[in-house]
Image (spheres, rainbow, N blue to C red):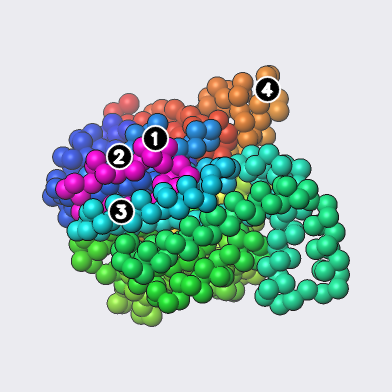
Amino acid sequence: MHKRLLGALTAFCLGAMTMMPAASAAEVNVKGPGAGKKIVYIPIDNRPVNDSQTVEVAEKLGYKVLVPPKEMLGGIKDYGHPEELLKWLEENSPGAQAAVVSTDAMLYGSLVGSRKHDLTAEKIMERAEALKTFHENHKRLPLYAFGTIMRTPRGAAYSSEEPAYYKTHGDQIFAYTALLDKEEMQGLSRKDKKQLAQLKAEIPAEYLDDWLQRRARNYDANERFMTMAEAGVFNYFLLGCDDSAVPSQTHRESRHLEELGETLGKTRSVVTSGADELGMLMVSRAIHDNLRDVPFVYAEYAKGKGAETIPTYTNEKIGDSVEKAIAALGGIPVNDPKRADLVLLVSTNPDGKTSEANFPVNTTKFRKGTKDFVKKVNDYVQKGYPVAVADIAYGNGADNALLEGLRKDGLQFRLQGYGGWNTATNSSGFLLGAASLANKMSKDDVADLLFTRYVDDWAYQANVRQQVANMLGGWPGEGGYGKLDAKLEPAREKTAALLKDFLQRNLCFPWGLKVQEVQVDFPWNRMFECDAKVVLKDEDKR
């Protein structure tokens, strides 16, 4: 491992970083189980976690993964190009072992595009039917699809990726549709009914109609995709709920679509929480199917509410989300770790509550339950089990106390996988997809993927991100956390310096390497996504 990684160039982006060996990926993975095989993949947008970092996992196994050019994929301003994506899919599918496509990209261009488009119902259905035609023209090609139920943001704070009126009326829209969901589930009190009527009167009718009609078109398309899965158009259709809550309009729609999906069963389709992990899960399933592999997964939770925890940004218990993710990737849950190909240990707070990783409360001091969980990880690792840790006690970043415990016990690079980068299901779902394939990788490649997560989830998301955010107000020029603008360059420089320091102090590199240089960019001109390149050098050859 040491020789292969000397002078390694490491790159991470939005929840993922890849340590690239000096040799090319083709040279390193020429004997992998996917050598000589091709997957075509259309991600939900151009954020690296959906694009290059999902691709990276498959390439560790030797697969050649083709992705459309960046200019075809959706971003923060350019929402994507569905017609060009369909043409690209047709041109690049011959000779592939599988095709994995985002239905949001194929219908609207991207995830953000799905929230802000002005497409007619007819145009959306025309694009949906094009996937059926594609299947009929490539019947021997396994086709895996994943889509989302539109999110219901809690209010104005999330308005940048919503229609303009959400900035002024987002809180009211969220509250109004949450009451509609509650009404269907359990009925409304007299106070609730009064609030519902008041909210409907306060929200301009044209805004509410626009928002609900766009959702209705999205709902109809997802319903159509589920019937396509039942008819065999898709080998699997995975439908996620973008940032959600209970109650909410997203949860309301998911309940109805899940009822429809019950006729298919989890072997053909599943409705779950999440969005950015869906591509990884479907790429993972495509690989497992191609290799005729069925991973057995044993899941165990921290003490307390554990599997009953309903994390922030989700609309279901984490135990249900994990079970659905296992089904989606083609795995089987088992009750005995001795039978498992992967032991998934899920870190939750004893009281079942989640906070944000960039809040001051996220320190290295052990909280109730942390010590016991670290001991649990250590015990399983010492017994030789392939352990993956889902770190979901906080949203949008790692638990500093847990990671400090892993560091002190020398467990950082003895795991088969780690995830703690965004929402609970983003973290656990992406982790399951990647770690379920890790037993087919070299130890070097597993270490690469672990390094990816520690840099973004721990170093950046849970620590450096907030440190730099706190400095933005003192720098000259226009810009801020959500739109850096004139502060982009100083943010790059300061983030790079802080990342270098954090990594050198907190990561126990098993290869005798040290951080030489860090370069940083923010591809969506905001603090939330970070794209860094880390150059490592041999500590003994300074």
Please tell me which residue is depicted at 64% across the width and 39% down the height of the picture: 160
Secondary structure under tag 4 reads: loop
Quadrant location of the N terminus in the rendered image: top left
In the image, is residue 108 part of the stretch drawn in magenta? Answer: yes
Secondary structure under tag 2 reads: helix
Q: Which residue is mark 1?
A: 72
Q: Residues within 10 Å of mark 1 (few under 14, many from 20)?
A: many
Please tell me which residue is depicted at 25% across the width and 49% down the height of the picture: 39
Q: Is residue 214 left or right of residue 201?
A: left
* Mark 2–mark 4 distance (CA, rounded to whole Å): 39 Å
Figure check: 456 above or below 395: above
Badge 1 amino acid: Met
Q: From which residue to which does the magenta span run?
A: 81-109
Find residue 146 and report its horizontal and vertical position in percent: 41, 56
Q: Nearer the viewer, mark 1 or mark 4?
A: 1
Give yes or no for contact between labels 2 and 3 (Cβ–Cβ under 8 Å). Answer: no
Nearer to us in this view, 408 or 282: 282
Q: Which residue is mark 3?
A: 133
Badge 4 amino acid: Glu
Name the quadrant containing residue 476: top right
Figure check: 483 above or below 448: above
* Mark 3–mark 4 distance (CA, rounded to whole Å): 49 Å
Q: Is residue 502 left or right of residue 368?
A: left
Sequence-wise first label, 1 or 2: 1
Give yes or no for contact between labels 2 and 4 (Cβ–Cβ under 8 Å). Answer: no
Q: Residues within 10 Å of mark 2 (few under 14, many from 20)?
A: some
Q: Nearer the viewer, mark 2 or mark 4?
A: 2
Secondary structure under tag 3 reads: helix
Q: Which residue is mark 4?
A: 478
Residue 88: assigned label: 2
